[in-house]
Image (cartoon, helix red, strand yellow):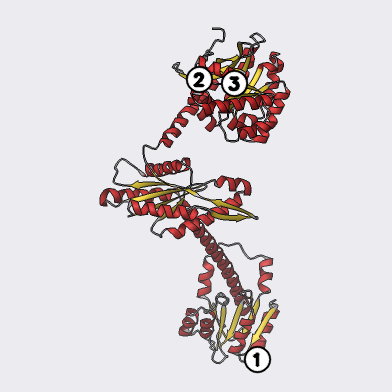
Amino acid sequence: MTAPQHFEPELDSELSTTSQAAPLTGSDIASLLDSKILVAGARVSDIAYLKTMLEISGFTDIKVAHNGEDILTCLRQGIVDDICNIDLVVLDSSIDGMTARDLRMVMKQFDEWQLIPIISLTAQSQWDHSQALTDLGYGVTTVQYHPLTAESFPPSVMTALAVKKERDQTYQQEVALKDEVSALKVMEARLKFSIDHDELTGLSNRRKLEQAIELSLIQARNFNISSVLLYIDLDRFKVLNDTEGHAAGDALLIQIANTLRSFFSPNDTLVRIGSDEFAVLIDNIQTPVALKKAEDVRSALDGYRFEHMGNEYHLSASIGMKLISADHELIAGDILSHANQACYTAKERGRNRVHLHNPGDTEMHKLRHNVQWAPRIRTALKDENFFLEFQPIYAVASNMISHYECLIRMKDEAGTIYSPSEFIPVAEKMGLVEQIDLWVINHVFDLMKTLPNEIAFNINLSANIFLDHQLYPLVERKLNETAVNPSRVVFEITETSAVSNFDQTKAMVNRLRGLGCSFALDDFGAGFNSYNYLKYFPVDMLKIDGAFITNLENDEVDQVLVKSMIDVAHQLGKKTVAEFVERQSTMDLLKLLGVDYIQGYLVGKPQSNIFD
């Protein structure tokens, strides 16, 4: 009898890549000995012999099967959480109808069984070349020949289990690598999407829009295909966002985005530009059709109802339009800018409207004017380029000048003088007027310290200064520093400013009056509710709006109204001032009507030196 032989070319191949690995440790061997082994064969005695041989060698978990159905049952029962706990199948050729080839063909159909090695036990005791190639070609790990011995069989089993362990590790690494690659692909797809899309709404973003506009310009220049860009800005979105929070604002923006999707085709480029701004590029469309489309969108958003936490909000939108034609001078940025300018004009003209871009729109000229003036104002504050002029106020009772109204002026580096009408509106829009108010207060108090005590000053204040926490401490400090009698100080506030933030303004006026300062309500009579405000607003003096004074002698209605203002003021214990008095006849009539003070060019023009 020839000595037992075994043939393991596939095993040698599988282990070749791990030939440099560290040798097995005691814990590794113990782990292999605990592996689950399925020994299958038709002859009970042969299977018992193999089991005994393995148990003597230290293997602890051995199952047996005597036919093909038993083998498959054991394999199926070994599956737990998509993993089969059987680590090795030893298949004897004595099983009818189940060769190693047949078993491997079945096992290859299931992921849970593909990695399990098979040791094939042949009936022949000598090398069978064709049979070995057949078995090994179908994934048999090892071919063993009878008779088996303790010197050859257990080591082959140990080697096959080591292969199983190596296969499991490799498979786990492959799975982890596939998961990582899949995650990277998802990240890559998200990154590609985010480059051209808005994260919140899923719409395209400005980058995608600019690319689309460039294509529209090429079509317009080369094929005379007209396009239009709509710039949509939600009106008063900030109110909801500030009162209800950003989560509510985001929810509304998503709803608006879905509403806009329903209005436009997939061929149109719908984008979210910014916080509450959207844009739509529509190609191959004529101006009348585009205007109708824009008006339909505006109408749909007009009164758009949004509910949040029991509160209901009604929205609208301002829409700017820019036609895209064969203009070789324009680029995508210009088109977007023009559409934005048209939207700004729509907002300035009352909101909730559609406006087609027009280079002659005065709103944009005003905006550019404001942008140019803002740095000039900042420079003037920094470099002390503001100065004061003083217009006298004549007291009828004493027949003398009793007050001077302080009027601010500004000069630039070239020495050009600017009146308040040129820079105060800009300062109000840009949030700089409060700084100007504080500058005036500082300088007037410092000037009053150097003048006789009988000279009093009227200081104009803007509406928002009454909300500034610096106002009261500044006046209190300047009164202490200069020792100026507070009765010499009259702060002027316009009727419209008094109405703005009424309660807070009223509270600040009372605090300043508590220091001894007086207040005059300027432009009185200009509003429809003048008398109503007078009833509740704590002022000491009324300055009658100049519109009632300029034609007083010739307009009986103005005479009646001025007379009523003077009488009501006197009944309430307040003094009256008539502005814009330029003729002696007007002054004489005002005296007959009972006015207390007169101001205008007849009395004196504004001048930088009150003693000239």
Q: Distance between the residues labelled 1 and 2?
A: 114 Å
Q: Is residue 143 above or below residue 485?
A: below
| Residue 299: image location, x then y, percent | 46, 54
Q: Which residue is drawn at 60% across and 81% down?
A: 89
Mark 1 belongs to which amino acid? Answer: Val
Q: Which mark is residue 410?
A: 2
| Residue 449: image location, x then y, percent | 66, 11
Q: Residue 44 carries which label?
A: 1
Q: In this view, does 193 lie above or below 535?
A: below
Residue 23 shows up from this direction: yes
| Residue 197: image location, x then y, percent | 47, 53
Quarter of the figure that contains the N terminus: bottom right
Q: Distance between the residues labelled 2 and 3?
A: 37 Å
Query: Which mark's residue is nearer the viewer, 1 or 2?
Result: 2
Q: Do the residues labelled 1 and 2 touch (CB within 8 Å)?
A: no
Q: Is mark 3 on a helix, strand or loop?
A: helix
Residue 196 shows up from this direction: no
| Residue 290: image location, x then y, percent | 37, 53
Residue placed furthest toward the top: 612
Q: Is mark 2 on a helix, strand or loop?
A: strand
Query: Which mark's residue is nearer the viewer, 2 or 3?
Result: 3
**N-term mark: 1 or 2:** 1
Mark 3 belongs to which amino acid? Answer: Leu
Say whether residue 215 is left or right of residue 34: left
Q: Which mark is residue 593?
A: 3
